[in-house]
Amino acid sequence: MRHWIAGSLGLGLFLAACGDDGVRPGEPYFAKPASQEAAKVIGETDPADLTDSQRAALVYAHAATALALLQAGDAEGGTRHLSHLDPSSHPGLMVGLDTMGFDPAPLAAVAAAPQDETAGLAAEAMLAALRPNATGDMKDTVAFLMKALGNAYEAGANAGTISDIEAYQTAYGLAIAARDIVAAQPDEAYGDLRLELELLVRMWPGAGPLASSTPAPDAEMALALSNVKLVLAGLP
C-alpha cells in the first residue's frame, strides 16, 4: 500500500517525519543549509568519502542527465553535466571509472549529433555497462541516492519554480540512476520499489529537466521520497 500524507509541509519536514536516523519528527531534515548539502551532489564533496559504487552512481546520474538534456535540445544544460564527467576537473570522482564501464565517447557523439539514433543507443549501452558497478549494496545505494536527491531538489526548486537549475537537473539524474539500478534487479521482491521509483522519475516532465519545466511542489516530491523510503525499509 502506498503511503499518503496530507498537508503542504516543506520537503525537509516531510522527510523528517519519515524517521531518518538522528532526526526527530518536526526537526528540519538538513543539519546544514540545503545549499551546502546540495554541494555534495554537485561536485564539492570529497570523493574519498564515497564508495566506488556511490561514485559510479553519481557519474551515472550526471551522464543520464546530460543524455536527456542533449536529446531534448538543451546543449547548454547537457554540456554543464558533461563537465562533471571530466577527469581533469573532477579527478577524485572519476578515477577508475573507465574500469567500471564509463566511456565518455558515446556522450560526446550525442553532443555532436543529439538526434542521431545510433549515438543515443551507444550512450544507453554505455550506461547499461556502468550500471552493475553503480549498484553496490542495492538498498544502501538507493538510500544514498534518495538523500542526495532530497538535498538537490531542496536547493533546486522552491514553491513551484526553479531556483537552481543545476541542482534541479541533478536531482532528476539521481532519480533516473536509482530507477535504473532497481529496474535491473531480477528479484520480484523489488516490484513495489520499482513502481515508486518510476513514479518519482515522473515528477519531472517526460522530456527531462529542462529550464522551462515547472517543478513538482515540495510536498509532492517529499511524498514520493517518503514512499520510496517506506518500501526500502520493508525490504530484507
Image: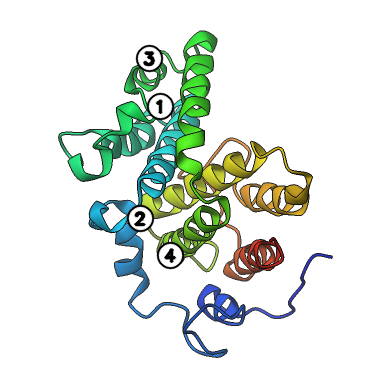
Kindly report the distance in space between the C-alpha atoms of the residues bearing marks 3 and 2. 26 Å
At x 57% / y 89%, what residue is drawn?
Answer: 25
Q: Which residue is mark 4?
A: 151
Marks 4/2 in contact by CB < 8 Å: the verdict is yes
Mark with earlier residue (4, 2): 2
Say which mark, if any, is on residue 109.
Answer: 3
Query: Residue 83 placed where, x, y %?
Result: 26, 36
Kindly report the distance in space between the C-alpha atoms of the residues bearing marks 4 and 1. 27 Å
At x 32% / y 54%, what residue is drawn?
Answer: 50
Marks 3/2 in contact by CB < 8 Å: the verdict is no
Mark with earlier residue (1, 3): 1
Judge whether 18 appears above or below 83 on screen: below
**Which corner quadrant of the image does residue 33 belong to?**
bottom left
Instruction: Name the residue type under label 1.
Output: Gly
Say which mark, if any, is on residue 101.
Answer: 1
Query: Residue 130 placed where, x, y %?
Result: 45, 31
Query: Residue 24 placed where, x, y %?
Result: 53, 89
Judge whether 17 appears above or below 124 on screen: below
Judge whether 102 appears above or below 16 on screen: above
At x 52% / y 59%, what residue is drawn?
Answer: 146
Instruction: Name the residue type under label 3.
Output: Ala
Query: Residue 166 placed where, x, y %?
Result: 37, 49
